[in-house]
Amino acid sequence: MSVKRLRQVFIAAADDFDAQCAFYQNALGLELQFRDGDQWAQFKAGDVSFALAGERERMGASPGQAIGVFEVTDLDAFLANVRGAGGTHGAVRDMGGHGRSALCRDPAGAAFAALQK
């Protein structure tokens, strides 16, 4: 099991997805790469992507919460290591061709996600 890279950071969106998208495009000048309705909007932000995640895509994160997403080689082994070190994780979400992911928490409760492509 190993972390390949920090793949992206997403913010769990609030109720007005359009307003949040406009904010990041207009205030920060981020270029929209693609958008899936009110569930996902991904922006160019250098080597790491930045995204807004709607209710279906945020894996249980609270609105306004920022989540770093680590790409891993073996999600099951990664989650076993999280548990073994005193962390927790939610259910694994199978996203078909987009991979599998899970929201995790370290022993202090800080949230992050893991993704296996």
Image (cartoon, rainbow, N blue to C red):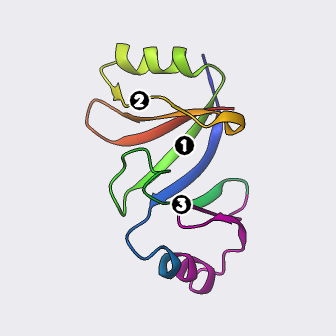
* Position of 43 relative to 23 (above/below): above
Other-residue count near label 3 (Cα within 10 Å), few / some / many at <14 / 14–19 / ≥20: some
The mark lying in front, picked from 1 and 3, is 3
Answer whether residue 49 is magenta in the image: no
Amino acid type indicated by mark 2:
Ala
The residue indicated by pointer 1 is: 69
Which circle's residue, 1 or 3, is located before the other in the chain? 3
Q: Residues in magenta?
A: 21-46
User: How far is the residue under mark 2 from the one under mark 1?
Assistant: 15 Å
Other-residue count near label 1 (Cα within 10 Å), few / some / many at <14 / 14–19 / ≥20: many
- Provide residue 53's location: percent of width, then percent of height: 50, 58
Amino acid type indicated by mark 1:
Val
Which circle's residue, 2 or 1, is located before the other in the chain? 1
- Provide residue 110's location: percent of width, then percent of height: 33, 42
The residue indicated by pointer 2 is: 91
Give whichever of 58, 29 is nearer the camera: 58
Point out the image quarter for the N terminus: top right
